[in-house]
Amino acid sequence: MTPLVSVVIPSYKHGHLIGRALQSVIDQSYSNWEAIVVDNHSPDQTEQVVQGFNDPRIKLLKIHNNGVIATSRNVGIQAARGDWIAFLDSDDWWDSNKLGKCLEFANDDFDVIYHKLKCYTVNSLNEIKIDGEVGCRDLAVKPYYSLLNNGPGLTTSAIIARRSSIISVNCFDDDMNIVGGEDIDLWLRLAKIECKFKLVDSFLGFFLIGGVVHMTAPDKSLRTIDFLQRKYCGSEFSSIPIWMHKSRLASYIKLQQYSLVMKYLTRMLRELHFYKTLLVFKRLIRSVVFDKFLNIKTIN
């Protein structure tokens, strides 16, 4: 069986990058795909680059998403004809075997299939350096528990998912308060309806470190954490997962709001179990200090 895969590519001001993303789709060993580029009216050469491929499988849609990438992805999902949706950000690209390897598991009752990604950076000479990997976890067992308690375990450009499953949970949430965290919210909702997740233990794509799409400013991160806490954790401070505590403290530090750091730490010491507080400190120190010296990039 060769199901149609709809590749959804949101883009804004990436005319200099989207050609590589699209070429990686064209180069796939698996050929039954369509690519839907959803462009946020980029004031650059994006349209010319996309149309220059002259491939009937590639479609270009233009919308005004008002800074909400979830809106662009949802437009692509609604326009898709495939049974499977593959997400690809316009500054990332895939290995030529990505779709073929993922679809080996399409008939095994899995709903979300994902893989590992290598990280890359671009220097001032426009030279690409492959450096590190995106943090990735196996979510085969208790995916909802794992995502809620341990944070993001997969990255959007690494995922193919059943369109019917995505539609059943109303696609990405386009609330402004979750911009930058709309992906984990969708994975949580898919896990909550008992979708099955499959990790393909291979590096099948490349993820830009420092890209506009992937960067979440600390103020946006705080809004995202507030949103997820209200939606999934309730009002009890002790029910907030360790990774959310860590992300909040890291955001305060980045914003240089040290009085809030001290206030939050005081509350943790007063209301959390001591061991849980230690785990928060461990993650915080690792994210703020040690990751600078490791060749592992953890995307939260």
Image: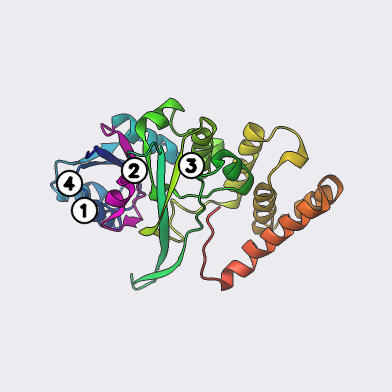
- What residue is pinned by disc 4? 51
Disc sitting over residue 165 in the figure: none
Q: Which residue is mark 2?
A: 86
Calculate the distance from the C-alpha at mark 2 to the C-alpha at mark 1: 15 Å
Label 3, on which residue?
A: 183
Label 4 vs 3, first from the N-terminus: 4
Give me the residue at 14% from left, 45% from top: 55
Q: Are marks 2 and 1 in contact (CB under 8 Å)?
A: no
> Considering the image in quadrants, where does the N terminus appear?
top left
Q: CA distance from mark 4 to mark 3?
A: 29 Å
Q: Is residue 133 above or below residue 108?
A: below
Q: How many marks?
A: 4
The one nearer the camera, 140 or 39, is 140
Local secondary structure at mark 4: helix
User: Magenta stretch containing residue 37, yes or no?
Assistant: no
Q: Residue at x 34, y 44 (%)?
A: 105
Residue type at numbered disc 3: Asp
Q: Are marks 4 and 3 in contact (CB under 8 Å)?
A: no
Dot 2: what SS?
strand
Circle nearer the N terminus (4, 2): 4
Amino acid on which the number 1 mark rests in the picture: Ser
Between disc 1 and disc 3, the foreground one is 1
In three-dimensional space, the C-alpha distance between marks 1 and 4, rounded to whole angstroms, equals: 22 Å
> Amino acid type of disc 2?
Ala
